[in-house]
Amino acid sequence: MRTGVYPGTFDPVTLGHMDIIRRGAKLVDRLVIGVTTNPSKNAMFTVDERMAMMKREVADVSGEIHVVGFDSLLMDFAEREGAGMILRGLRGGGDFEYEFQMVGMNQQLNNRIETVFLMADVALQPIASRWVKEIAMFGGDIHKFVPPGVNADVIARVEQIGRKGS
Ligand code: ADP
């Protein structure tokens, strides 16, 4: 059985992530979505919230998909999950530099696990969780960037913590 791990922060999950998940699920028998539990400075959602959102959104994606939190080294997590590959999405030059270095180092930590890069649909490539949060915090419309359920979650969170700007 071929297992792949797709790791990320997913704060929140976007249509870009969903596209990579759909494409990735076709490449493996079992896809493990690894949600990093290390808190980021600009986190809008807790790990539990991010995992719950992800589980809800992947419910209708075909294939065996698991959502698992992890706070260890990615390569150790992938090894524990019995994965033969790590899936990452590539958006452009900026991602490339970062990923190039990370894969180079990860290869030296574990040469058994390959990293495979996927490109999202061209229209979805510019989407980044960071900008989704920024736009929403200023009251902008994010419905083109995230699944409908996530749109509602983000709007509710922004109302809770208060919008930026006036
Ligand atoms: P991280 O915090 O590790 O960057 P993210 O949750 O932002 O995690 O992203 C997880 C993965 O999804 C990364 O490989 C990232 O490059 C990829 N990704 C995010 N948004 C897109 C997108 N719009 N198109 C393609 N890949 C994407």
Image (cartoon, helix red, strand yellow):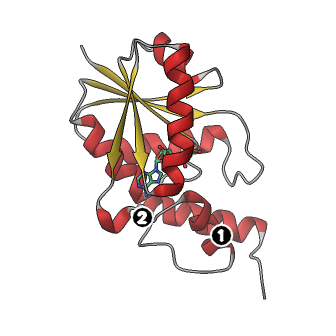
> Relative to 85, does residue 110 appear above or below in the rendering?
above
Q: Any mark on residue 134, and which? A: 1
Separation of residues labelled 1 and 2 (CA atoms): 18 Å
Q: Which residue is pictured at 22% across the width and 38% down the height?
A: 62
Position in image of residue 76 (x %, y %): 55, 14
Q: Is residue 155 left or right of residue 84?
A: right
Dot 1 or dot 2, earlier in sequence: 1
In the rendered image, residue 16, in percent from the top left (x then y), is placed at 40, 56
Kind of residue at disc 2: Pro
Say whether residue 137 is left or right of residue 103.
Answer: right
Residue 114 visible here? yes
Q: Residues within 10 Å of mark 2 (few under 14, many from 20)?
A: some
Using the rendered view, name the quadrant where residue 163 is placed: bottom right
Q: Which residue is mark 2?
A: 148
| Residue 165 placement: quadrant | bottom right
In this picture, is 121 found above or below 9? below
Return the x and y of residue 154 as percentages of the image width and height.
Answer: 59, 63
Q: Is residue 42 left or right of residue 156?
A: right
User: Would residue 59 be seen by someone viewing this image from the given angle?
Assistant: no
Q: Nearer the viewer, residue 127 or 158?
A: 127
**Which tag is nearer the camera, tag 1 or tag 2?**
1
| Amino acid type indicated by mark 1 | Glu
Q: Quadrant of the C terminus?
A: bottom right
